[in-house]
Amino acid sequence: MRKLLVSVLMLAALLASPGFAEGLLPDIPKAMGEPHPEGNEWWRVNHPALLMHSRDQTVIEGIRDVDASIKTCVACHAVEGPDAAPVTYESPKHICRACHDYVAVKIDCFQCHNSRPEEADWAAVLPSLGGTPESLRAYLERISQ
Amino acid sequence: MISTVYAVLFYLATILLVVGVGMRVWKYATTPVPLNIVVSPAPRTKRGVVFRMFREVIFFESLFKSNKWIWIFAYLFHWGMLIVLLRHLRYFTLNTWWWVEIISPIGRLMAFAMLAGLLGLWARRVLQERIRYISNPSDHLMLALLVGIAASGALMSYVTHTDIIMVKAYMLGLLRFRIGDMPTDPILMVHLGLVALLMIIFPISKLLHVPGVFFAPSRTLVDNAREKRRVSKWARNLPPLPEGIPANEEA
């Protein structure tokens, strides 16, 4: 028994390598703009609760001026498709689907909400159309008013 | 550090589960069955036995016939657990299978079926004096272990989430013998720890009814004692009878 334990431990030490996640994690597209101060891990765990909270504030309590809305999420996290336009939720490259497909979690946000900015604002959020962190910030300020 | 401890724990638990259950199954398969002890009324053909075992495994037929309350709770628990387990396949396959995706929302709810079934079965052991009297500590502890697993899992689904992206990456890594980092949320650690414990004690527990049901001679034999004489292996090698005793007993 002890021999078995020792050999398993040694094997485990051998296997623990920094490059473990290679090919095992979803391809999460980088967002433009400043990173969330809470960190990505925090957001991965808590974004459903935040979205539900915002929904309750808006729909039930009638508070419209919440800081964050899905509109701002999909602005910073817009992913450019092959046609020089942000992809919609139809595409597996969409920021939400990158992870949600990976763990088979279905969301119904985009049955009503737009999964990308309006066409007039594409230039503000896509680097290839001239979008910069500044133009993005200006856009975010405009839509949060 | 914690990730490595859990990795070792899971590798050990897997070895113990596979080897342990394998040894048990071997023992069951090689245990002599000298007599046809099938419980009648029983099917008189092999095909009939297969059909009866199918009903036993899928519908828990004999339990249904003996006790409706136990059947309801056992059925809730077992089917809830099956769907919950199938839902967990999403953590072990890089590209989640389509049918796992389909059952996923149902699997989320099935945590409650599991818990209801387990608590019902447990209540029976506590509240019914006759059953309380014959309950061993292991009966209660098995139920406690399963309730712990189901409750910690449901907590992560419904109350305090964990980073399932990293959980999946960690599990996929374990399957490829690459140990990465797992989230260190207390509830996740309790959940995984209890699962490893379950895997370890499975081969020495009452949960062996899972493979055992397929080796129960009172159910798996064909009721053909009249048509076919059953001679056990050792009886075939008996020395010839002394002179004067008639060899043919089929008078």
Image (cartoon, coloured by chain):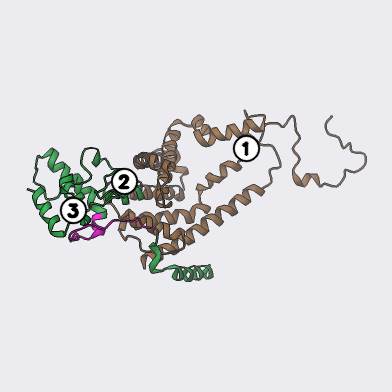
Chain colours: A green, B brown
Q: Element type at marker 2? A: loop
Q: Nearer the viewer, mark 3 or mark 1?
A: 3
Amino acid type at mark 1: Thr
The residue beneath circle 1 is: B220
Quadrant where the C terminus of chain B is found in the figure = top right
User: Considering only order in the chain, which callout, 3 or 2, is on the residue closer to the N terminus?
Assistant: 2
Whether the magenta-drawn stretch holds residue A5 is answered as no
Q: Is residue B187 visible?
A: yes
The residue beneath circle 2 is: A91
Q: For the residues tagged 1 and 2, is the chain the same?
A: no
Q: Chain of mark 3?
A: A
Amino acid type at mark 3: Val
Q: Are marks 1 and 2 in contact (CB under 8 Å)?
A: no
The residue beneath circle 3 is: A125
Give the percent coordinates (x, y) of residue B81. Answer: 42, 43
Give the percent coordinates (x, y) of residue B62. Answer: 53, 33
Q: Nearer the viewer, residue A21 or A84?
A: A84
Q: Is residue A79 left or right of residue B82?
A: left
Amino acid type at mark 2: Ser
Give the percent coordinates (x, y) of residue B25. Answer: 60, 50
State whether residue B18 is above or below residue B128.
below
Q: Is residue A120 left or right of residue A24?
A: left
The magenta region covers: A24-43
Q: Is residue A110 left or right of residue B106?
A: left
State whether residue B54 is above or below residue A120.
above
Image mark for residue B243: none
Q: Nearer the viewer, residue B56 or B158?
A: B158
Q: Chain of mark 1?
A: B
Specify the principal SS of the magenta part. loop
Q: Element type at marker 1? A: helix
Residue drawn at 68 percent across, 43 percent down: B33
